[in-house]
Image (cartoon, rainbow, N blue to C red):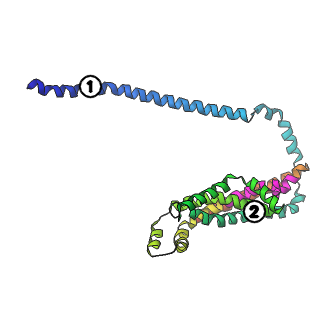
Amino acid sequence: MSGAADTPIQDIGLGQSRSARLAPVRASMLTSMGIAIRSVIVVLGLAIVVQSLIVVQARPQDLITGFHGMVDMIRRATPPDFSKLPDAVWPTLETIDIAIFGTLGGIVLALPLSVLAAANVSPARWLYHLARGLIGFARAVPDLVWALLFVTAVGLGPFPGGLALAVHSLGMLGRLFAETIENMDMAPIDALSLTGASRLQVFTHGVMPTVLPAVAGIGLYRLDENIRSSLVLGFVGAGGIGFQLLTAMNLFQYREVSLLLIIVFVLVFLAERLSAICRARLA
């Protein structure tokens, strides 16, 4: 009887001692696996960096040998030709208005699509996927490509630039608006739905008041980005100061180029500061 009673106790003791002996082995194996995984990640990271340097044909020595050319261009661009300042006023205004038009157009297009693209308020699953697809497509195509398409359709000038920014902003704003709606508090929406409110009433009295501060902040940030983008769109004939900058560069009028670059810097700086101030007041 005594021997039979002692056997389970001895087995338990042996099991515990076996587990205790295996614990350091398991810990060592886990440590080795962690080191191996980290080593693989480091090697892959280095390989990605090396292949990127090879693909872009990085040659730092060319910067040294070509430094005198950059210095010569800077010398020819100074001092800025401020006599051209009156001619730059209208293109600067065009650039600002292209950004405003594109941002407002993007907001108007993005708001209804963002409601359909938000999983928590979308009326149907197929509408959710359709809205997400349209938003993704508008965002995937670069604004320069949109500008080229609209220049082909309506001709040169600021209008195709504004249209390009509106469509591209639809992609960016639609995604951000949809994520904002998905993360909002659903209590007011559920309360309105229980009272028998229509979908339009739920949107105007529930969704919009809840997300309006975030939507306004995102719109202001997008306006800041669109001012930068509108400068580049001028390179493909979409008007604004970018087109004048490209023309001056093609004519080797480097003093005018330096003046336009100063205007661009001031414009971007002021837009960034005004946007930051407005977002801080809305927060």
Q: Nearer the viewer, residue 62 or 160?
A: 160
Which part of the image, by quadrant, shows the C terminus?
bottom right
Say which residue appears at 72% left-offset and 59% top-offset: 165
Q: Which residue is mark 1?
A: 17
Q: Position of residue 267 (x, y in %)?
A: 75, 59
- Label 2 residue SS: helix
- Label 1 residue SS: helix
Q: Is residue 239 magenta?
A: yes
Q: Residues within 10 Å of mark 2 (few under 14, many from 20)?
A: many
Q: Amino acid at mark 1?
A: Ser
Viewed as shown, does residue 34 lie left or right of 61? Answer: left
Q: Is residue 132 magenta?
A: no
Does residue 214 show up? no
Q: Which residue is mark 2?
A: 162
Q: Position of residue 158 (x, y in %)?
A: 80, 62
Most common secondary structure along the magenta stretch:
helix
Q: Which residues are magenta?
A: 222-247
Say which residue appears at 80% left-offset and 54% top-offset: 262
